[in-house]
Image (cartoon, rainbow, N blue to C red):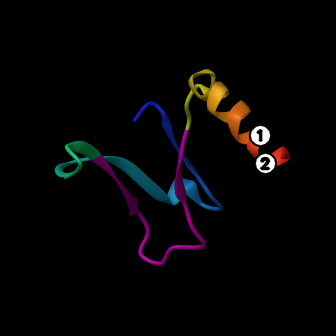
Amino acid sequence: MDCWHLAGSHPSTYESGIDPQITYHAKNCAYLKCLVEEPEDFATLVPSFKAAAYIRLLEHFVKEVMV
């Protein structure tokens, strides 16, 4: 899961990975599993991606919002 990162208040108490038995629209699904019996607060998976592919869409969105 190169483009996903654990974040939140206690990410070290969770693990994440790919579940090979579950798919969504023929794509792999990730899991987030707590490693302690009584978790404190939370953890979440955060995606990372290169924004260059979306710059034109963002420019269009900003123009629409500014009108």
- Horizontal relation, residue 59 to residue 42: left or right: right
Say above or below: 8 vs 62: below
Query: At 56% from the left edge and 55% from the top edge, which residue is drawn?
Result: 11
Residue where numbered disc 1 is placed: 62
Q: Quadrant of residue 18?
A: top left
Q: Which residue is mark 2?
A: 65
Between 13 and 67, the one nearer to me in the picture: 67
Q: Residue furthest front?
A: 67
Q: Are marks 1 and 2 in contact (CB under 8 Å)?
A: yes
Of residue 14 and residue 53, the one placed in the foreground of this image is: 53
Secondary structure, mark 2, is helix
In the orientation shown, which residue stands out farthest toward the right?
66
Q: Is residue 4 left or right of residue 17?
A: right
User: x and y percent of residue 25 in the render?
Assistant: 23, 48
Q: Amino acid at mark 2?
A: Val
Instruction: Name the residue at 47% across, 78% down.
Output: 38
Please state the extent of the stretch shown in magenta in the rendering.
Answer: 29-47
